[in-house]
Amino acid sequence: MAHIEFSKPLSAFSPPFDNFFSIDERLSLIDVQRSNEESYKITLIFENEIRCGLRHQLTIRGFEDLLGNVMLETTIYISTPCKAEPYDIVINEIMADPSNPVRLPEFEYVELFNRSEKNIEIGGWTFSYGNTNRTIPAYLFPAGGYLLLVHANAVPDLSAYGATLPVLGSLTALANAGQYLQIRDNEGKVISWVDYHSDWYDEPLKSNGGWSLEQINPDLTCSVESNWKASTGRNGGTPGQQNSVYASSSNIALPEIMRVAAPDNHTVVLYVSNPLGNILPDISQFSITPKVDRVEITGNHFDQLKLNLQSHLNEDTWYDLSITGNITDCAGYKTHPTTFHFSLPQYIDSLDIVINEILFNPSANGYSFVELYNRSQKAVQINDLQLSLRNNNGVLSTPVPLSDEPFLLLPGHYLVVSRNVEVVMQEYMADNRSSFLQMRRMPALTRTSGRLVLLNKSLQIIDEVHYDSRQHSDFLNVGGGVSLERVNPNRNSFDSGNWHTASQTAGFATPGKQNSQYIEFSGTTNSEVSVSPEVFSPDNDGINDILSINYQFDTPSLIGDVIIFDSSGRIIKSLARQQLLSTEGTFTWDGADDRGRKALTGIYIVYFQAYNSEGVQKVYKIPCVLAGNRR
């Protein structure tokens, strides 16, 4: 049926109704009912229901008002709007930087694609870019069709490529470097969104302008980086037609619940690796005391689950949260069961978190990264941490927050930060996505040496590392893509012997997991000085590459000499000369002599002398074996 309202009350009328109405052949009019109360309204009854999204042409004529005035023949369109569900219409192509055009007009555009089987009226919807909201004009978006949102000045040129609507508020509305775009219907429901970035081009020349970003598969509705790439079309883009990069599949990973946050004592937030779908999980899928009272999907990327608890969490209490799984992402895939052992966040103090691995000289197409390790027994909040660089004058650069999100880094866990974690994970074959965090801004690590500082929000230094390419193994011609690993997170950050080249067998870096050069040191031995292992092989295979010389004394402020002799009594390496010792510590030997050459295989003597001005003198001579390459 359809309701029609006239401007004046109507005089009586009777069949045949063909005298008053003509309608297209897709509808058959069987009756016309007049309102009993308001004679200026009538209702048309059709044989079949009006299918949503279809427009029907209706011509009206012959009606008279109460004074006998006959209305002019009028043609209108009647339709029933189709209700749009999220991702029925998707943002499918973005021309953010039309400068240096290939063959397209030099105008920005955002292409929408109706991937549903419904014709959808989008008039009155909202298109948002950055902080700007624009209303979309009336338009019946046909199923399977494309639509370009452009500036009014671009309509004459871009309409040659397909349907266009003047929506963008300026000729430079879209940010070249990246921006958050969103489409909402009349009820405020988000239909489509994308948070694009210039890194998505993955081709530096194309990111300089003239090329669009295209979605690979519009049916994989999780708008993540792996489903986008630079256009390969000969014009620089494909407005109004199927994307040049279209493929029926894409390498979107299965969803994973990666992190947990406790922003306040009544709320727990879970972070999911993929945007979530429309199915709200049942509270029975979450097991925790206190119980979950309500679940919401939140976040600009719709990748967070907010759990509202029935009662509050207590300070200094650890909780176990179990998720049975079946959390559905926007592509329909489900997560696996997961458990988190967490507490409310605690204050981050010095050396609670340490810098554990640094890639400061990435490969030609790679990205630098910094790995952090929580060596404390605290749950610490990542948005309380910042990275900075210290220059040669000791001045710190403006600190860069690791994240705006308050998720927790739990005891014994790693976190790798980089400007492109996808590339880092691929290069080093990492599959533990929960240990990686992408930073849009990150301090620029110099490729030879630098001073990296980790601070909390109070600007207290949590850890500081002075890295240098000379800390790499003397036996490797180290190029790009090789990280420096911390030998033990409990040893001094400034101790150059506590850093070593990541092993070759581990792929020259171990982001997100225990370092290949990690050496356990408990700090307790039966002797004041000991070495481990007794046989070491500095071949950078990650197995016994370093000799650790451990000491612990009851006497403070001793002066020490640590010298390596060969079996003939010749000095091979001076590790320490008249150095003020702590009560306990470690020296390391990587098998190099004082000239940086690899020592020959054989037996060596570690000469360790400790003394002070009061006559205390301790001398140790401990044998070790430098073994050859076992391959």
Image (tube, rainbow, N blue to C red):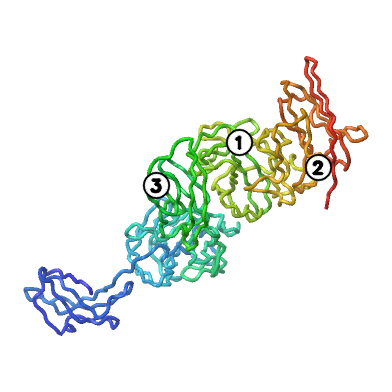
In the rendered structure, which amino acid carries the disc numbered 1?
Answer: Val
Which of the labelled discs sits on residue 536, or is there none?
2
Task: Look at discs 2 and 1 and give the one toward the viewer.
Answer: 2
Which of the labelled discs sits on residue 81, or is there none?
none
Q: Are marks 2 and 1 in contact (CB under 8 Å)?
A: no
Which of the labelled discs sits on residue 453, or is there none?
1
Question: Can you give x and y, in whole percent of width and height, for residue 216 in the image?
Answer: 53, 65
Which of the labelled discs sits on residue 308, or is there none?
3
Of the pair 326 and 120, the residue shown nearer to us: 326
Is residue 100 something that shows in the picture?
Answer: no
Would you identify the image quadrant in which residue 146 lies? bottom left
Identify the element where label 2 is drawn. Answer: strand
User: For this view, does 626 lie left or right of residue 220?
Assistant: right
Q: Is residue 252 above or below residue 452?
A: below
**Residue drawn at (42%, 63%) of the image:** 87
Q: Earlier in the sequence, mark 2 or mark 1?
A: 1
Q: Earlier in the sequence, mark 3 or mark 2?
A: 3
User: For this view, does 181 lie left or right of residue 376?
Assistant: left
In the rendered structure, which amino acid carries the disc numbered 3?
Answer: Asn
10 Å crowding of disc 3: few (<14), some (14-19), many (20+): many
* Quarter of the N terminus within the rendering: bottom left
Question: Can you give x and y, in whole percent of width and height, for residue 139 in the image?
Answer: 34, 67
User: For this view, does 15 lie left or right of residue 272?
Assistant: left
Distance from label 3 to label 2 (Cα)?
Answer: 54 Å
Task: Look at discs 3 and 1 and give the one toward the viewer.
Answer: 3
